[in-house]
Amino acid sequence: MSDHFFVVTGGPGAGKTSLITELSRRGLHTIPESGRAVIREEMQSGGDAFPWADRMAYAEHA
């Protein structure tokens, strides 16, 4: 494993997930973005800890 780390940032729809997916497909070690998991779990459980609804609750979960 390399000792180089990169952080991918950008606005919604900028292609972050597509880029990370492609890097992973090419054999690079990647870590999924934790925010997506929080949103998915909140939607499934009927919660409201979304970044657009309750930023503090979302930050505590992420």
Image (spheres, grey):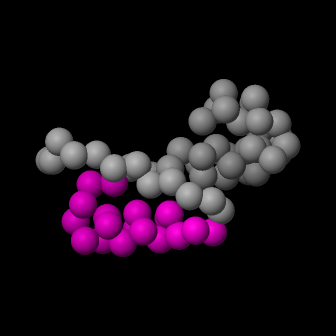
Q: Is residue 30 left or right of residue 2?
A: right
**What number of labels is visible?**
0
Residue 47 higher or lower than 12, as above or below: above
Residue at 60 percent of width and 52 percent of height:
36
Task: State the extent of the magenta-drawn residues as a range.
Answer: 13-30
Q: Nearer the viewer, residue 7 or 25?
A: 7
| Percent coordinates x, y for residue 39 in the rendering | 68, 49
Q: Is residue 35 left or right of residue 18?
A: right
Residue 53 shown in magenta: no
Residue 19 shown in magenta: yes
| Percent coordinates x, y for residue 18 in the rendering | 47, 71
| Percent coordinates x, y for residue 32 in the rendering | 45, 52
Residue at 76 percent of width and 51 percent of height:
43
Q: Is residue 44 left or right of residue 38?
A: right
Residue 16 higher or lower than 60, as above or below: below
| Percent coordinates x, y for residue 56 in the rendering | 75, 29
Whether residue 47 is visible to the viewer of this picture, yes or no, is no
Residue 61 higher or lower than 48, as above or below: above
Quadrant containing the C terminus in the rendered view: top right
